Amino acid sequence: MTASTQQTHPNNQDQLLTPGEVATLFRVDPKTVTRWATAGRIGSIRTPGGHRRFRETEVRALLAELTNDVGSL
């Protein structure tokens, strides 16, 4: 197990993504992701320093849901 894997998956917990990483997945600006979190469209966690982080499984589930919705049009 590498050092980075130990940091991102301690005790098999979900990996946390930054707003920039989420924005890349959705192809939007990171500020859009922050607005979604503020509006409650996507759940976020605050770090002790006040930064937002997003659970990878939740982000990927939302992305899959939105992709399926668009595909059915």
Image (spheres, rainbow, N blue to C red):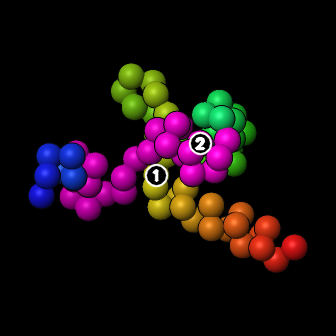
41 on left or right of 12: right
Disc 2: which residue: 23
Given the current orientation, which residue lies at the most extreme bottom position?
A: 72
Few, some or many residues within 10 Å of mark 1 (<14, 14–19, 20+): some
Above or below, 68 against 47 in this view is below
Percent across and percent down for residue 54 are 49, 46
24 on left or right of 3: right
3 on left or right of 29: left
Disc 1: which residue: 55
Few, some or many residues within 10 Å of mark 2 (<14, 14–19, 20+): some
At x 21%, y 46%, the residue is 4
Percent across and percent down for residue 65 are 67, 68
Separation (CA) of disc 2 from disc 1: 13 Å
Q: Give the amino acid type for the residue marked by disc 2 in the picture.
A: Ala
Residue 18 lies in the magenta-colored region: yes
Residue 60 lies in the magenta-colored region: no
Is label 1 in a helix, a strand or a loop?
strand
Q: Is residue 34 visible?
A: no
Is label 2 in a helix, a strand or a loop?
helix
Percent across and percent down for residue 11 are 21, 58
Q: Quadrant of residue 61?
A: bottom right
Give the magenta-colored segment's residue range.
7-28
Q: Give the amino acid type for the residue marked by disc 1 in the picture.
A: Arg
Q: Is residue 30 visible?
A: yes
Above or below, 17 against 56 in this view is above
Q: Nearer the viewer, residue 22 or 27?
A: 27
At x 12%, y 58%, the residue is 1
| Tag in front: 2 or 1 | 2
Marks 1 and 2: in contact by CB < 8 Å?
no
